[in-house]
Image (cartoon, grey):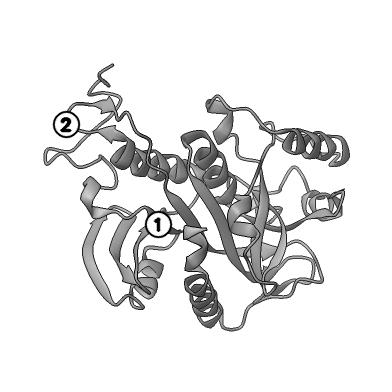
Amino acid sequence: MRIADSELVLNSDGSVYHLQLHPEQIATNILLVGDPGRVKMISGYFEKIEHKVQHREFLTHTGWFGGQRISVVSTGIGTDNIDIVLNELDSLVNIDLKARKVLPEHTQLNFMRVGTSGSLQGDIPVNSLVVSEGAIGLDSLLHFYNYENNDFEKELLAAFNRSSGLSFPGKPYFFEAEKSFLKYLSGEFVRGITATCAGFYAPQGRQLRAKAVMPDLLESLAAFRFENHRITNFEMETSGIYGLSRILGHRALSFNVILANRPNGKFSRDPQQSVNILIEKVLENLSLLEA
């Protein structure tokens, strides 16, 4: 069936609405960053850059690194932006934009998030590198989509709902990471579950002048255990990336550098250098995308 103009919105040049990209301008291996400035940091390592496109907070550089064609795309902050970015990237490879019809053969994209985060555990200091084995969404995005969790995801989520003692505005959800990526990853990354929230202040347990309704949020999340899994860090994108990647038939893995240790009240003294180290480590592991 033809997708209506109001549902698949295109620009006058035929590019997708928000990203302003054409299919030939992206690779199937994509690094996702929140900050547009981080796109330039990563593409600075490329041997060659083919495309540079920017619209609003969405900046894309596509080029070559280590013999692989890579795109780096800035998402901006939050799972609301992840909803835009992943759907539009998927449409570039799985929809005939001129005919407005889903293509008969599915193309799988590989996503790696390169982000920053706060630690919920006192033993994970600032500047640590974390990989998300799974993500608990406290933001509600995935409840607007039809999906089915596997048995492990259902069991962990049920345990979380029983143990947290908190009443969230939206029902939490949970997705595992792409295991084919994880099994090849070296031990330099701390592994754990990432909690994804809908904001930076009260939704992450911060109080400035406005009071938060869940003052025990951090302690409750940090105390959660399921088998040998615990919640290691808090940020604003990973659950949306994992959930939409699963639904759309793509693969995803999320890496974060810890800039803040919430239990200890510490913040990295050189966040820029910490981000640079993460970028270099992720680039070293690009072979995972072909696993």
Helix, strand, or loop for circle 2?
Answer: loop
- The outermost residue toward the left is 13
Tell me what residue is drawn at x 66 percent, y 66 percent.
Answer: 130
Question: In which quadrant will I find the N terminus?
Answer: top left
Give the answer, above or below, for where 165 lies relative to 122: above
> Residue 198 is drawn in which quadrant?
top right
Residue that badge 1 annotates: 29
Left or right side of 221 for 148:
left
Helix, strand, or loop for circle 1?
Answer: strand
Tell me what residue is drawn at x 27 percent, y 21 percent.
Answer: 3
Label annotation for residue 98: 2
**What is the x, y in percent for residue 161?**
81, 35
Left or right side of 46 for 270:
right
Q: Which amino acid, mark 1?
A: Asn
Q: Which amino acid, mark 2?
A: Lys
Tell me what residue is drawn at x 63 percent, y 27 percent.
Answer: 148
Tell me what residue is drawn at x 37 percent, y 57 percent.
Answer: 73
**What is the x, y in percent for residue 163?**
88, 40
Give the answer, above or below, for where 189 lies relative to 58: below
The residue lying toward the viewer, choosing from 228 and 232, is 228
